[in-house]
Amino acid sequence: MQTLLQDFRFALRQLRKNPGFALTAILSLALGIGATVSVFSIIYSVLLNPWPYADSDHLYQIHLPDKSGNDYPWSLTGPQIRQLRQTHAIADISGLSQSRLTVTGKDVPEDVAGIQLTGNTFQMLGVSAMLGRYFVPSDAPDKHDPQPVAVLGYKFWQRHYNGDPSVIGKAIELTHKSYTIIGVMPSRFTWYDGDVFLPLKMEGDQKTWYEMHLRLKPGVSPAAAEAELIPLYQQFDKERLYHFPKGYKLRVRNISYRYFHRMGATLSLLFGAVAVLLAIACGNVSILLLARGTARQHEFAVRSAVGASGFRIVRQLLTESLLLALTGTGLGVFLAYRSLSLIIAQLPEHSFPHEADFHIHLPVMLFSVGVALLTGVLFSLFPALQVARPEIGQMMQSSTRKVAGSVRGKQLHTVLIAGQIALTLLLLTAAGAAIEGFLQMIHTPLGYDPHRVMSVGIPVHENTFTSWGERSNYFEQLRTKVGVMPGVVATAISTNATPPANGWTQPVEILGKPAMDQQEASVNFVSPEYFDVLHIPVRQGRLWDHTEAMRGAMLAIVNQAFVKRYFPNGDILGHSVRMPQQNSYARYQLTVPNSDGWLQVVGVTGDALNDGLDKPVKPAVFVPFTINMWLWTQILVRTEGEPLPMLHSIQQQIASVNPDQQIVTGSDTLETYIRQEPEWARGRLISILFAAFSALALVLAAVGLYSVVSYLVAQRTSEFGIRIALGARKIDVLKIVLASAGVSVGSGVVVGLALSLGLNRLIGRWVAGSAHNPVVLLAVSALLLAVCLFACLLPARRATGVDPMEALRCE
């Protein structure tokens, strides 16, 4: 123990005597470990430990992926969920329904996200209430009316009650119905982003659908559950045509599946990038340790001469390395803590559970310490072994100022620098491809004009406007009321047609033409003003007018993608299309008579993105919104100035028509919706982080190259002095120094280009750009070479300024 303390004190003195070396090594490790820890913290919070629920690995949903690649959980009716409860595989199952409620008492109604849950849900999730209690099955007995009780979400409790703990037992009125508050959930309980959680009564009809979650019995695998559930779902499919997707496959998936599916590959890519950055940082430390150790060979020779063993010297060097590694790790964890919020802000909005708890967890800290120990030992062991066996006779005969480097040490320097250059070029190429792809995406023509347009969500309360005429007139009245406001240019109703990902994909039939395989289109319910608000041009025919819309005329407009797909050689105007699934299958759905009948095509519009930002435009059919109306709609509002400042005034106008009518919290501009698209946010995240990691790698590689060239200059000081004394010009010395670094840089660039081209397919899975783009390759190679040249010139200029007499005196 005494010897270890002695090694530690001596290591500390050595680092204090060489602050430049110590600071460079510590900062190199801090940057590499800080980036690694921050990304690993995101991975841990999003993929490894996102949920606060008990045994979340055993919480599942039933997905029905189809041939088109859609993969979502599907709802069932109350009787169907009760049938699932009787199966052998399922231990427990909960039902859920979402609704928009209001709290009155302000100048406009406050929108509340109401989540209705079966009485067993909280027990199944295994999360205790922060205040009071949650409701249990006795509060919501199956097939009976539930108790009028409510459990508040943490954010709603903070926002509406200012975190008052005395709310338990008080009443809250939601859409004119009084509930007793029995509990408040903790901050991490954000199940479906609910504000208020209410007991659910599952109806016994075949028109009310509920989302569901389940636990499997111990020992039952998802595959075994699928085998048992498939026949039951086939029975459900026969009972209710068109509800399930065509050609589906039943899958039992964990509740984390969609987040793994959306962000798993992206985060793996980022983790690979920071691993490369960490390798470059560790290579830097290894270069510095090797150069530092070579410079101390005289010291080690003296210590060997007085009896120090090679093991003793290696242990001393490892102690110094571990001290550097632990200090760098501590600083790296601090940098990760400070930068974590910056990375979280760039994550796509719905790419992670809102229950995720982002901070430096204990497993992340243990990971950091492990990385520090690994880097400290692994990347210092070889340099330590290189200098632990000094040639005592040669070193004792040399001056203490002479620096002698072995051929093996020079080769190791060459390999380390070449590796750094290659990995840096790989990161730069990936960053260039990501930025190129992201720029292409944001400059892709949309086909519509989103500027100064916002979408205002209008949820209709249950048991209001229950007839087709009442609801259609109500929606039109709200649109007209908003349209006459000062500063409003135009308004339109868009039930489900708000781009850039809009419409419901449904099978379509074309009168007089045989059905094709996968003959589908994106069906949109809009008012005729929709195309004017979004500046979507009409290429052929006409739009339906207001009178036709208000009587639910069976008319349709298609986009050019529809014409190209299904009418490549003919005029579609006057033909008829049909969506056989357009009928009143849901409890709250109001349709015109024979809504699944034939619709006459009267116009063709230009194409507008409707399947996200990175996919081709899907064939689309637009029909009057009155043909199919639900308990919600959207009003698109184009304004003269910025739309959001007008949102409160719009709320007041809507409340003047109906004091109970709120607008959906989160109503926003179309430009914001574009930025929230997963592919846009993912492209931005990868571009920003890869650019940052590449910049750090470039700095680290430059520092490593600078260190090696400086070491070379110091090693060959006498040689340069003699050359200058014999008449060599400064340019000749400069060429020698640059040529010595040129082998490392050149080989690193060649290997880096080979890696970039070889991994192009892998890079292309996550970024829209290509590493094969010659512009990207040339740009990043030129940038890297310019930085390398600058890093070499500084010590090279010192070599040209060597005083021959001083160099000869050293000799």
Image (tube, rainbow, N blue to C red):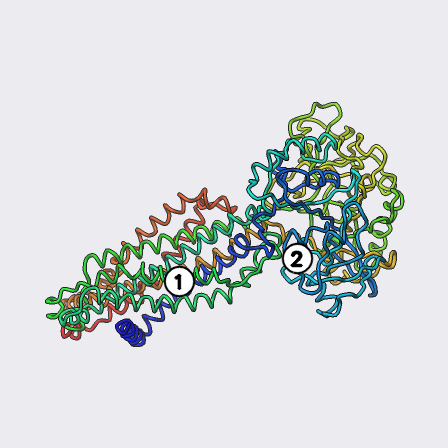
- Total numbered badges shown on the rendered structure: 2
Element at label 2: loop
One can see residue 719 in this view: yes
Q: Amino acid at mark 1?
A: Val
Q: Is residue 772 left or right of residue 355?
A: left
Q: Percent x, y for residue 67?
A: 61, 33
Q: Which mark is residue 733?
A: none
Point 79% across, 43% down: residue: 203
Task: Please report the residue visible at 30 percent of the width from the left and 51 percent of the height from the top.
Answer: 747
In this rendering, the answer to whether 88 lies above or below 574 is: below
Mark 1: which secondary structure?
helix
Residue 464 in the image: x percent, y percent?
A: 86, 49
In this image, 25 relative to 676: left or right?
A: left
User: Would residue 776 appear left or right of 378 to someone viewing this image?
Assistant: right
Identify the mark nearer the N-term, 2 or 1. 2
State how far apart marks 2 and 1 are (Cα). Answer: 42 Å
Identify the disc placed on residue 699.
1
Residue 721 visible in rendering? no
Q: Between residues 335 and 653, which one lies in front from this camera angle?
A: 335
Q: Quadrant of the N terminus?
A: bottom left
Q: Quickly name the residue at label 2.
A: 190
Task: Report whether 469 appears left or right of 502.
Answer: right
- Circles 2 and 1, Cβ within 8 Å, touching? The answer is no
